[in-house]
């Protein structure tokens, strides 16, 4: 017997010209628009324990990653960095560029900007307050303007289904490269309307973006820790432009994802690293599934960015509408338990169908933790504990290594 | 319920690529193929949700 419907969400079609999509949400999946949140807790944690980029806080493993990549990934990532560099530099100063003209008084430019963003190719576009509680500490003084334009660019469907693979990494980083260019063009358009526009490069993240996308009604947070949007699921790359243009904000939407993921759990059971947790927790004021970084990171680095949690998400694979319709009709999760949705191959490990997971030795999960200087100090301390006082050469080597890290300073916050 | 196993899936997608990889419709056909396989695995009709070419392709591999 069909499940009762709580409400129907109507969203624009996937491509320009496509009809609107009516997505029915089952009564037993309805919770709240956006994410379950305790606003005071979000404020408290952002004040007392401000967020920082993993590239800054976990710089030791970011550097270690380069030594683990297979050659093809290493070469491609180097090339990606070269391509991204001018985009990052252009984005870094974009907020300081003055508009080309005076704005027209009382002219709401929201739909103009949305239409331009869609014309450029962004699949999902939304507007919300730029919530600085999610801005990285290292970007607090850089980020300008009160309004956020949330921009999602779909990454290639075919390549995404080949995860984990070099092909999928082309899609992953290639989409960021395209998004970075398109956003610079959109920023120019906003300036032509008389307003400032600051591009938050997707290759040099300024903060945690997903909460803003959720607030802008573009999706909800999935159990895989990714934004699940109506047409792409998690197969989209996210970025922001902030502006002083007086835009009208969109509202968060209940797509039923908060409960759907509790029923589905495909990403949780298929994660090769066993890094996703079944139960939600309250974290920094938001109820969500948290992944175990120390399990995810080494497998991600070793196996071409992994991404199995993205690939096996039924919303990513089939889109939200057929998945929700199937759930209402049958109470089942479309594709769950089938080789087509759940099967994947890991280089050197073979094929894993539903119910099968790869085995990794304990050593596979050993990698440097914290910042580079923390990791350097930890190693030095262990050496002292084992061997007693360092000799002059060892002390000098430690000091030189530390100096090198300090000199390098905080670099980009990519990935 | 019998579902498509890996060998059958590989054959379906190989045939799809062989016949349509150069077509601008390939992306949509690929999406349709995944949806059709999921519906077929669930024992449900396609109800005009997928391209006719995909309906035939899936039927030929059942």
Image (cartoon, rainbow, N blue to C red):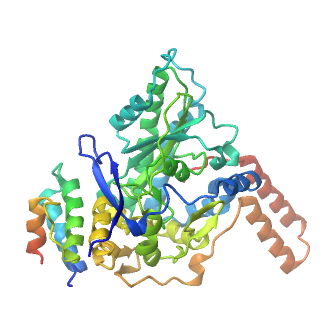
Q: Residue at x 54, y 48 (%)?
A: A212
A191, A353: nearer the viewer:
A191
Q: Position of residue A26 (x, y in %)?
A: 36, 65
Which corner quadrant holds the N terminus of chain A?
bottom left
Would you say residue A308 is visible in this rendering?
A: no
A325, A295: nearer the viewer:
A325
**Does residue B30 appear to the left or right of A103 in the view shown?**
left
Q: Residue at x 37, y 52 (%)?
A: A155
Q: How many marks on residues?
A: 0
Determine which quarter of the picture holds residue A338.
Answer: bottom left
Q: Position of residue B16 (x, y in %)?
A: 15, 63
Which corner quadrant holds the C terminus of chain A?
bottom right
Determine which quarter of the picture holds residue A123.
Answer: top left
Would you say residue A140 is visible in this rendering?
A: yes
Determine which quarter of the picture holds residue A307.
Answer: bottom left
Q: Position of residue A264 (x, y in %)?
A: 40, 73
Q: Residue at x 63, y 71 (%)?
A: A367
Q: Residue at x 64, y 53 (%)?
A: A53
- Residue A141, compared with residue B26, is above or below; it is above
Q: Position of residue A120 (x, y in %)?
A: 35, 36
- Residue B50, compared with residue A350, is above or below; it is above
- Residue A82, compared with residue A370, is above or below; it is above
**Does residue A56 appear to the left or right of A251 in the view shown?**
right
A348, A18: nearer the viewer:
A18
């Amino acid at each position: 017997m069909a499940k009762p419907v709580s409400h129907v969400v109507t969203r624009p079609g996937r491509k320009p010209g496509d009809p609107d999509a009516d997505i029915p949400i089952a009564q037993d999946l309805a919770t709240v628009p956006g994410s379950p949140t305790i606003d005071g807790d979000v404020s408290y944690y952002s004040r007392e324990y401000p967020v920082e980029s993993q590239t800054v806080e976990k710089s030791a493993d970011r550097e270690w990653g380069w030594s683990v990549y297979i050659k093809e990934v290493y070469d491609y990532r180097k090339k990606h960095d070269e391509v991204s560099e001018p985009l990052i530099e252009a984005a870094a100063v974009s907020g300081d560029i003055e508009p080309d003209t005076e704005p027209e008084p009382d002219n709401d430019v929201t739909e103009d900007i949305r239409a331009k963003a869609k014309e450029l190719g962004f699949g999902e576009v939304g507007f919300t307050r730029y919530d600085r509680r999610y801005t990285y500490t290292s970007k607090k003084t850089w980020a300008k303007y009160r309004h956020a334009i949330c921009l999602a660019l779909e990454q290639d469907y075919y390549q995404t289904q080949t995860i984990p693979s070099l092909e999928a990494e082309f899609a992953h980083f290639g989409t960021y490269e395209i998004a970075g260019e398109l956003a610079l063009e959109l920023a120019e358009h906003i300036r032509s309307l008389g307003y400032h526009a600051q591009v938050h490069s997707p290759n040099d993240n300024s903060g945690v973006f997903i909460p803003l996308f959720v607030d802008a009604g573009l999706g909800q947070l999935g159990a895989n820790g990714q934004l699940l949007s109506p047409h792409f699921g998690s197969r989209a790359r996210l970025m922001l432009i902030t502006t002083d243009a007086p835009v009208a904000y969109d509202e968060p939407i209940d797509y039923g994802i908060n409960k759907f993921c509790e029923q589905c759990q495909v990403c949780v059971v298929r994660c090769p690293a066993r890094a996703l947790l079944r139960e939600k927790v309250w974290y920094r004021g938001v109820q969500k599934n948290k992944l175990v970084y120390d399990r995810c990171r080494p497998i991600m680095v070793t196996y071409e960015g992994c991404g199995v949690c993205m690939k096996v998400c039924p919303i990513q694979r089939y889109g939200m509408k057929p998945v929700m319709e199937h759930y209402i009709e049958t109470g089942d999760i479309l594709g769950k338990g089938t080789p087509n949705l759940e099967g994947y191959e890991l280089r050197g490990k073979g094929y894993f169908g539903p119910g099968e997971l790869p085995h990794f030795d304990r050593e596979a999960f050993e990698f440097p933790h914290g910042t580079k200087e923390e990791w350097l100090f930890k190693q030095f301390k262990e050496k002292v504990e084992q061997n007693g006082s360092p000799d002059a050469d060892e002390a000098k080597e430690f000091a030189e290594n530390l100096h090198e890290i300090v000199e390098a300073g905080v670099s980009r916050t990519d990935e | 319920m019998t579902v498509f196993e890996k060998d059958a899936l590989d054959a379906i997608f190989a045939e799809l690529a062989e016949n349509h990889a150069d077509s601008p419709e390939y992306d949509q056909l690929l999406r349709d193929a995944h949806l059709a396989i999921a519906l077929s695995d669930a024992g449900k009709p396609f109800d005009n949700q997928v391209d006719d070419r995909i309906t035939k392709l899936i039927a030929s591999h059942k």
